[in-house]
Image (cartoon, helix red, strand yellow):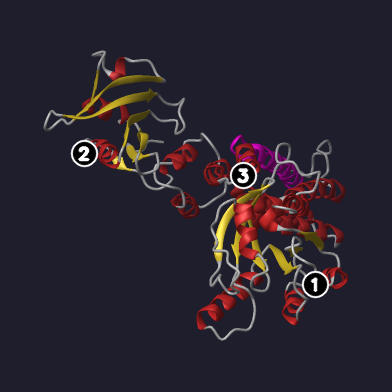
Amino acid sequence: MEFDTIAAISTPMGEGAIAIVRLSGDEAFSIAEKLFKSISGKELTEEPSHTIHYGHMIDPVSKEVAEEVMVSIMRGPRTFTKEDVVEINCHGGLVSVNRVLQLCLNNGARLAEPGEFTKRAFLNGRIDLSQAEAVMDLIRAKTDRAMNVALGQMEGRLSKLIKRLRQEILETLAQIEVNIDYPEYDDVEEMSHRMLTEKSTYVKKEIEKLLQTSQQGKILREGLSTVIVGRPNVGKSSLLNSLVQENKAIVTDIPGTTRDVIEEYVNVRGVPLRLLDTAGIRETEDIVERIGVERSRKVLKEADLILLVLNYSDLLTAEDENLFEAVQGMDVIVIVNKTDLPQKIDMNRVYELAGQYKVITTAIIEEKGVDELEQAIADLFFTGNIDAGDMTYVSNSRHVALLNQAHKAISDVLEGIDFGTPIDILQIDLTRTWELLGEIIGDTVQESLINQLFSQFCLGK
């Protein structure tokens, strides 16, 4: 498959030590040759692959030196895109890197679309679609666990499992075809309902195993939406600052200081939290605060985890008890804060309201109880038998949706067997399962979906 030559800046925009302009395609070397003058005097085409060379970028029109650079050359197919690749390392300033990019575009390259380098790696057979999507997961990883999951997927852990399941289905389909087309051959193993049941049950169980990891996988990939709720001045903003380890929220003794939802990402024992500090939920005449309270109620409904904060030095109020009612059925950790102050709260009533919820006492200002809180969050979502290093996680919502559809299709096969449906009819649902699994790795996916997926990538990747 042949493509034109593309170019893009592959490092973040802004000031830095270096910036990289990447070229990929059949003309990558010839375009670089027009612009690069090596100190050694050799042509890039004469140099061995996977080497780096010092020199200058020369504007072919003005003949002036445009930039001092190091140029890396890599010949296909031993590259990420399986094409010839040139990477121009220049000084990391906006003007310098844009000047080098413009020279490449003026001399035969086309500006790459978002994700086009990775798209070419997929189209050229270097990686499959699930591995390509893992590239973006790796870039966006917020914890070591999330990074390990993405690395495992990039290495093909999920792909190998999907391909193995598809091969099992394909062999079963082939046996069905043989028995349908050549029923007269006695030595051909008859495709019985029993054999089909065994194969379908195996595929179904493997799909279920993957789906069981989807909750943890989604958390690792997207972060756990965690909402801190409580009456004003119970220490919600102090808790946010403690977890983030920065003074992101204003902390005062004045109730109602937080007027809006404050959002921060934080890594708690390998669990990425999308931490939301809300305005204290209470009835108020203050218009601005009332808007903040309404927003707090909205994010409360969408949360994965609730940190419900109470004040150790205050009596329980009707507002506190209403909060317990509002979070029923959700994952909740109850935090009784300000234990450094004299006790007024009825702890027996707190435990009664909390029921099965974990209750932790803290003095956030003195950093007491924070370690116990962090461990409780990790224990709630990652039990001891979960280890990102040796499991195949499904974290991509597209993959989860396709696995659910495949699970439904293979379940229909087993139901059909129970009802005595003819095997050639069951073949339709079995083929559908095979196709759905193929969409995960890109074997049976439409071009429009491929374009949509890669358009979400950053430019230059």
- Crowding around mark 2 (Cα neighbors within 10 Å: few <14, some 14 to 19, many 20+) is few
Q: How far apart are marks 2 and 3 (CA)?
A: 41 Å
Q: Position of residue 329 (x, y in %)?
A: 78, 70
Which stretch appears magenta?
A: 153-181
Secondary structure of the residue carrying numbered label 3: loop
Q: Is residue 115 above or below residue 22?
A: below
Label 1 vs label 2, nearer the camera: 1
Secondary structure of the residue carrying numbered label 2: helix
Q: Mark 2 points at which residue?
A: 106
Side (left or right) of 61 relative to 238: left
Residue 432 disc label:
none
> Mark 3 or mark 2, which is nearer the start of the sequence?
2
Q: Position of residue 382 (x, y in %)?
A: 75, 49
The reply to whether residue 421 is in sight is no
Type of amino acid at the residue the image marks with label 2: Asn
Specify the quadrant that holds the N terminus. Answer: top left
Q: Position of residue 399 (x, y in %)?
A: 63, 52
Q: CB under 8 Å between callouts 1 and 2?
A: no
Q: For this rendering, which residue is in front, 33 or 287?
A: 287
Q: In this view, does 271 lie above or below 252?
A: above
Type of amino acid at the residue the image marks with label 3: Thr
Q: How far apart are marks 1 and 3 (CA)?
A: 39 Å
Instruction: Residue at 83%, 35% (x, y): give it.
Output: 187
Label 2 vs label 3, nearer the camera: 3
Type of amino acid at the residue the image marks with label 1: Lys
Q: In this view, does 24 lie above or below 173?
A: above
Q: Quadrant of residue 11?
A: top left
Q: Position of residue 4 (x, y in %)?
A: 32, 38
Q: Name the residue under label 3.
A: 143
Side (left or right) of 382 relative to 160: right
Q: In which quarter of the image is residue 8?
A: top left
Q: Mark 1 points at which residue?
A: 344
